[in-house]
Amino acid sequence: MAGIVSFGAYVPRYRLKRMSIFQSMGWLNPATIMLSQGEKAVANSDEDSLTMATAAGLDCLGSIDRSAVDALFYASTTMPYLERQNAGIIATALNLREDVRSADFSGALKAGTSALISALEAVGSKNVRRALVCAGDCRLGMMGSPQEMIFGDGAAAFLIGEKDVIAEFKCSSSLTCDFVDHYRGSKTPFDRQWEDRWIRDLGFDEFIPKVIRNLLQKCNLKLSDFQKLIFQCQYDGERKTLTKKLNMDPARIQDPLQGVIGETGTAHSLIMLVKALEEAKPGDKLLVVSFGSGCDALFFEVTEKIKEIKGNLGVQGHLSNRTELTSYQKYAVFRGMVPVDLGLRAEEDFWTRWSLVWRKRKAIFGLVGSKCKKCGTPQYPPQRICVNPACGAIDEMDDYPFSDKKGRILSYTGDMLAASSDPPEMYGSVQFDGGGRCMMNFTDCTLNDLKVGMPVSLSFRLKYYDPKRDIHGYFW
Amino acid sequence: MATGIRDKVAILGMGCCRFGERWEAMAEDLMVEAFQEALQDAGIEKKEIQAAWLGSHIDEINVGKGGLPLASTLKLPFRPVTRVENYCATGTEAFRGACYAVASGAYDICLALGAEKLKDTGYGGLPGGAAFGQLNRLIAPNATAPGLFAQLATSYFAKYEIDPALGKKALAHISAKSHANGAMNPKAHLHRAVTEEEIIKAPMIAYPLGLFDCCGVSDGSAAAIVTTPEIARSLGKKDPVLVKGLAIAVSSGEEAIYTNWDGAHLETTYRAGQMAFQEAGIKNPRREISMMEVHDCFSITELTVYEDLQISPRGRAIEDIRNGFYDLKGQVPCQTDGGLKCFGHPIGASGLRMLYEMYSQLLERWPEERRVKSPKIGLTHNLGGIPSNNVCSVAIIGR
């Protein structure tokens, strides 16, 4: 039976206290004080929904054989490209096979669960053996808006298969409603929403019980048969109302992580599901409900295999890798909400030469180098003539992926001259364990953290944004 | 069997414009200044120049490509003009082209001229761009020259277990010494003597390099006219300055992507130094080199170059620096004109500017206050690219 084989998550390291948002923007909209509790996870300046989804995918795959993945589905409402398949970038970054099936799921916040259902059904149909679902969002509320308080950034990923399943997929039910509680057109980065009371009373309060009722009927169960109910609802009060209305023990309601991450859009119900799986025991029945332009409800039953899952950072691991972003202004600049002076150096034109990008896609997005068959020297970028001066073999190379390798810092600097939205720009030479070296940017750290010899690992990040041509460029 | 360049070429004349933020001047204007001085010094007429090499590095904000800018600016009538570019060794590369042409016997008198206009970018430092090719723009870090060279310092300090504060003090001495020299030089861009304390306290540019650890950014041009020693003597140069050695070493990727480089020295400089010393017949550089102009794009570069050229023992340059070994009145005065520190680094011109200083010192042309005492051998050194991947040139001239 199809089900979840592995899970992963990504929560960016920076957390922004909601009170610091209020302190900066509360003057504009004093009522947002009601939403000012806790903190939200915010993407670094070199992160977006695609890099976070990739990170969750990496966390999910761990040491699992990537060549066995037959399909990749990416869900987000904040994809960098409207035309150019975003999942294709992730597939290359994850070094998946070229004959992988892929799709972008977008539009509704329930797109994450829709992608999950599609993957489960694709595996169930035996057309694919293993499918990876990555969902990530990095949504923007306007400065001073309630959404700015509510939204957080994050991603989740699931590997779906039929063997070694940790949670079996039992059934699903869906609702499709053109209920415009919030929307975003194609020409604006900011979410807009209608009145909260309407969203609460007509949206959450009606749709969630309805989709749950439909699913229970379909599988002939009672809600009390479930150990965990995982539903996406951004309103604290409404969660309590629904818990009562559904007659559920509050202890069986999955924590929405609103106070530590925030509402993460298409990824949200999936991040909650990851958290639920981290806490689940064999035999648990889990009911996941997403919300957004309708609902998807999915029923999973946890198997004995859950005990064997290890190594993934998941939600819990990422939550503990935390540092406070103390400046709201930095957040606003990171998300491109305000124009800032990065200096004339930042204005240099840079063409992305697509024919070159295609030719070198494995090296650029996959961080695939080469390893000499004669002397075993790993090298990046890939070479035709071996760089080992004692070897020099020509065209004797195998592909050698570096993205899963650890390394150590050989040299570093913090550069105040380079154009950067978070100076100093930090970079240096990395010596990879097992051989190979490369000069790379350092991120998610401060200059004080860097030391020669300290260990580093790789993360797929936004390398540049070309505003003239609306190009998001990625690298590790 | 190759016999090398030693004593086969003489410098007939040299010229160097005033370096600086020459807002009033085009690169072409600077070329004319340098050329005029070189021609006058050589004591020949323009028509006697049979071939020329132009060094310029950055196309976009400079004179453009090809040999045209030199020929059309100097009005050299239908002569062979070759433009060369080899990163920061560009000026030396132009000189090399002219020297080899003379040594081969193809021409009697050749011109090497380098020029660069850096101050039309609108911002400080060197412009970015595709200097390392299109693939590198997609995979290399968002780096600038100070940040790339700053890493030499973090690695050097780590390797030799040097307290960063003490390391910075040694670097400050390097810059202070060059500023002191530059302050006496009317052609330098920066004329202010700076104390070590000011240097240490200056704003950070790329950790651990502060503002005064970085060389200036200037416009400039310099030129050399070369010929055979015989022709030089026949033209009245009784004891001409001769070329003793010319070497270029280029990284093969070993430092950048193989795993044997320590990040704390410049391998190309060591290699080019070895080649040049052999060609020039120098066995003990610490004793035989009278003075140097090395590529002090950043203070830490100068420090490691002392060791790579085997003037200071490995890991011990700081002792020599502290002892004033490289000061103007030290044993091997370095950056006697103020260096890149005070002249800035108009890339195509720098190598020739350095040679101009060594040549002038060898001819004892400078006033007493900035004159090196009876020098025999002068060395120039350029390093272009980044510490892990670069082009290095070493030129040795003497009498």
Image: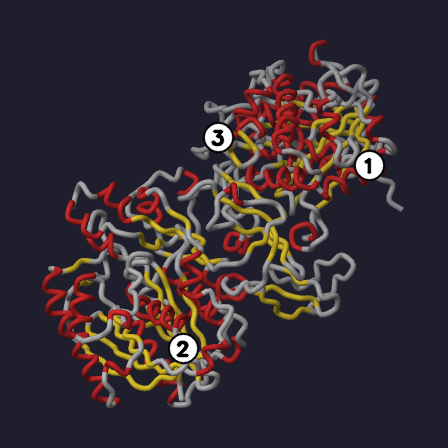
Does residue B86 appear in this view? no
Same subunit, labels 1 and 3: the answer reads: yes
**Chosen colour scheme:** secondary structure
Q: Which numbered disc covers residue A281?
A: 2
Left or right: residue B42 versus residue B216 is right
Q: Quadrant of the N terminus of chain A?
A: bottom left
Q: Which residue is mark 1?
A: B5
How far apart are labels 2 and 1 at the CA level?
Answer: 80 Å
Instruction: Classify A401 as above or below B250.
Output: below
Give residue B221's quadrant in the image: top right
Is A317 on the left-hand or right-hand side of B212? left
Res A181 visible? yes
Q: Secondary structure at mark 1?
A: loop
Contact, mark 3 vs mark 2 (Cβ under 8 Å): no
The mark nearer the N terminus, 1 or 3, is 1
**Which is more toward the observer, B359 or A460?**
A460
- Kindly indicate the quadrant of the structure image that contains residue A469: bottom left
Q: Residue at x 65, y 44 (%)?
A: B390
Between label 3 and label 2, give the one nearer the viewer: 2
Q: Are marks 3 and 2 on the same chain?
A: no
